[in-house]
Image (cartoon, rainbow, N blue to C red):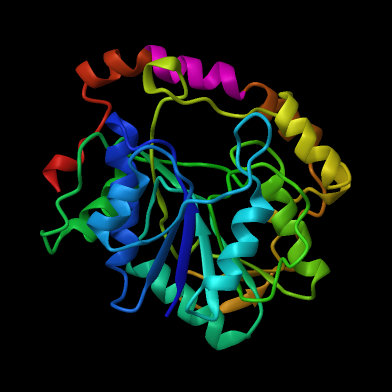
Amino acid sequence: MLTFFTTAKAFRGHDGVIQRNALRSWKLLHSDVEVILFGDDPGAAEVCAELGLRHEASVIRHESGAKFVNSIFGRAQEIARHEYLCFSNCDIVLTQDFCEAFKKAKGWTERFLLVSRRWDVDVTEPIDFSREEWAREIREMALAEGHRQDESWIDFFVFRKGMYANIPAMIVGHCYWDNWMIWQAPAEGAPVIDGDRFLVPVHQNHGYSAQFGRSKGVATDALSQHNLSVIGGARHIRRIDAATHRITIDGDIRRVMIRNTYVPREWLRYKAWLPVWHAVLGATRPLRTILGLRSKAARM
């Protein structure tokens, strides 16, 4: 079927909840799914034992402690059981529409990169996966109450083993490495397939403040600038709207006749404003909860 691989933050508090939700959703996609979790972050070994995942504790890190992309991707390709792999951020819940998109892409061509825009949803509690309706309900909640991010937000990459053999020393969790992935696929002769019209990847919202124990790279921070430098600058940056093909709502794969092959300056300025946006989200979270503007997974 497919090998998922990822890396996570410490499995504490809300991060622990949403990361378990994501990992369990991948395992439930198919009986032959393999999931590999990279890193020795607190709770990782215990969660792998609990959920039946493969744990690769050793990851090469930058002096800051952040993990290198090439270390994770290189090792994943060495040990994966399956011919196709998916790197996903560890806060993304996937359902059967993802499997259908993957099958359509694989049936269309052997080598490809499959990506899609995400839907942001407030999930604050463990999803009850024992309920048959959980997948339908979280998808419907995303469409009804969630926010679909623009083409700048790239949270998973599905590709065939053998691609991305020479990844620069980029750092996970900071800007530009994901944009380089989209640029690199056509450079290796692989089409980029945008699944946005067909599938609904659910991103579980989380905080980027000290309250949640997390930080987020932005376009101007040192590690994002490191990524920009090692990929050779902005000419090697692409967003999802640079995809060469698209899965239609009916499941057909068609060439994109007009696509964006450059990164607008407006997007770079937008990336620089991300910390302000996350600060606003964090500050208004209690009020939005009181007003009922946030949703809980408990009802699923």
Q: Where in the figure is residue 90, as x and y percent of width and height?
A: 43, 48
Find residue 79 and report its horizontal and vertical position in percent. Answer: 53, 72
| Displayed quadrant of residue 145 | top left
Determine whether 4 is above or below 211 in the image. Answer: below
Above or below residue 90? Residue 13 is: above
User: Is residue 277 inside the magenta stretch?
Assistant: yes
Left or right placement of residue 10 versus residue 179 in this view: left
Q: Is residue 199 above or below residue 122?
A: below
Determine the image quadrant of residue 97: bottom left
14 on left or right of 190: left
Of 89 and 104, nearer the camera is 89
How many numbered dots are placed on residues in this image? Answer: 0
Compare residues 184 and 108 and report the one nearer the observer. Answer: 184
What's the magenta bit mostly, secondary-structure-wise? Answer: helix
Specify whether residue 56 is in view: yes
Chain part drawn in magenta: 274-283
Q: Residue at x 26, y 51 (%)?
A: 138
Residue name at image x 54 percent, y 87 percent: 107
Where residue 100 sits: x, y (%)?
41, 76
Which of 300/17 is in front? Answer: 17
Give the residue drawn at x 73%, y 74%.
190
Locate residue 27, reporting x and y percent: 31, 65
The magenta stretch spans residue 1: no
Q: Is residue 263 shown left or right of residue 124? A: right
The picture quadrant where one finds residue 165 is: bottom right
Task: Tell whether 176 sits left or right of 207.
Answer: right
- Specify the quadrant that holds the N terminus: bottom left
Q: 46 or 122: nearer the eye?
A: 46
Q: Is residue 21 visible?
A: no
